[in-house]
Amino acid sequence: MPASPLHRVAVLVLEGAKPLDVGIPAQVFTTRASMPYEVRVCGAAPGLVAGGDGLAYHVGHGLSALGWADIVFVPGYRHPDQEDPPPAVVAALVGAHERGARLAAISTGAFALAATGLLDGRRATTHWHYTRALAARYPLVQVDENVLFVDERADL
């Protein structure tokens, strides 16, 4: 029986990334022989990314990993209500979506997806502390503050 193809997973680490939010997809979808995944942790550029809670991340890949991935996770990051991710990050997320990659936000990573416009007209949620800020910053997003997650399978 031939080996099944690997699912390609990118974990996008933004400035101020939350350790738990980065660690969950990196660990759950880890690259190992018994799992059908290949994971690449990436940032706006390869190298050091200042994280949240006193940590920093050395990411091996830049935004090209979003063009490679079947699934893109956007972990939460610090102060997402204050500014959008860099334009190159927003464009890479839109590009990944346009070529068919599934996008998933963890916690405040929803702000990065909202910045792309891909959540306009869709239900979304974020960390409870930021739900009202998400709704105010992105009024076209249908923010549901009473759920832990939203699955909008259509094309995200």
Image: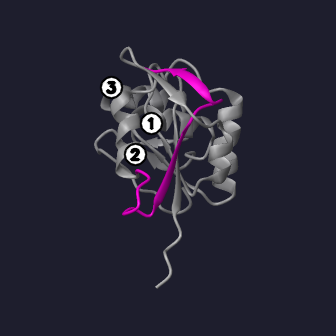
| Mark 3 element type | helix
Q: Are there few (<14), some (14-19), or many (20+) residues within 10 Å of tag 3?
A: few
Closer to the eye: label 1 or 2: 2
Residue type (three-letter) at the residue carrying disc 2: Pro
- Write the start and end of the magenta stretch as one range: 30-51
**Along the line of sight, the residue nearer the viewer: 155 or 59:** 59
Picture layout, residue 110 above or below residue 100 = above
Closer to the eye: label 1 or 3: 1
Q: x, y percentage for residue 62?
A: 65, 36
Q: x, y percentage for residue 150?
A: 38, 51
Q: Left or right: 145 with respect to 142?
A: left
**Along the line of sight, the residue nearer the viewer: 101 or 22:** 22
Callouts 1 and 2 close, C-beta under 8 Å: yes
Point out the image quarter for the C terminus: bottom right
Q: Residue 32 is drawn in which quadrant?
A: bottom left
What distance separates the C-alpha of mark 1 from that of mark 3? 16 Å
Picture layout, residue 25 above or below residue 60 = below
Residue type (three-letter) at the residue carrying disc 3: His
What distance separates the C-alpha of mark 3 from that of mark 2? 22 Å
Q: x, y percentage for residue 73?
A: 48, 45
48 falls in the magenta region:
yes
- Residue at image position (46%, 31%) is 134
- Total marks placed: 3
Residue at image mark 1 = 75
**Residue 129 - label:** 3
